[in-house]
Image: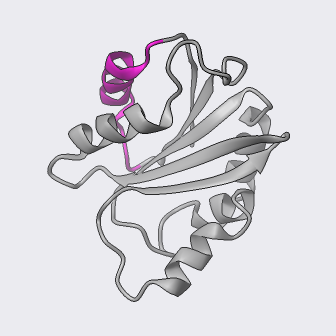
Amino acid sequence: MIKSFNELQTHISEKTLGILWPTPNTFSLDLEDFNILDFYFDGLLGQKINMESQISSAPNIFITENFGQNIFLLQFSIHEQNWKKTFQETLKILLPQNGTDQQDQNHLIIKTSPQINIETEMKKVLELEIKKNFTLTFCQ
């Protein structure tokens, strides 16, 4: 866990717009790196677990502040039948279009785990949706 925390810490900066978190299962406390991301997002992940009696398989979006700017976390299960379509539709909402105020935030982190090997698929989906140049960082 410490290695994962340190790796994520080295990648987050004032240019980071968001973290994409594909998971092997639906949202739960048992997900790898749950505690690390809950820490970075001010306990919002744990609050969601505590507030909802049943977690749906829909993507989860969390927003907090980092370096004085908003940063989002998008968690989604890759074992959902239409995960690519849902992922694309959600990105359209989250990512700024050209000409918006968020030109300085051009970095996306993709938080993966060893049991998920979807880097190639993620790059294809991201290339279809990203209308400006983003720096992508894959980290475990």
Nearest to the observer: residue 97 or residue 33: 97
Tell me the quadrant of the picture where the N terminus can be found.
bottom right
Q: Quadrant of residue 37?
A: bottom right
Q: Where is residue 118 in the image (x, y as percent from the top left)?
A: 34, 35
Q: Is residue 29 left or right of residue 44?
A: left
Q: In which quarter of the image is the C terminus?
A: top right
Q: In which quarter of the image is residue 26?
A: bottom left
Q: Please, is residue 89 above or below residue 120 in the view? A: below
Asked if residue 126 lies in the magenta stretch, the reply is: yes
User: Would residue 6 be seen by someone viewing this image from the given angle?
Assistant: no
Q: Which residue sits at x=21%, y=55%?
A: 80
Residue 7 locus on image (x, y percent) = 72, 41
In this rendering, would 98 be left or right of 77?
right
Q: Is residue 47 above or below residue 78?
A: below
Residue at 58% in and 13% down: 99
| Magenta span of residues | 115-131
The picture places residue 42, in percent across and down from the top left corner, at 74, 64
Residue that extends furthest to the bottom in the rendered view of this protein:
53
Whole-percent x, y for residue 119 in the image: 39, 30
Q: Is residue 86 left or right of residue 108?
A: left
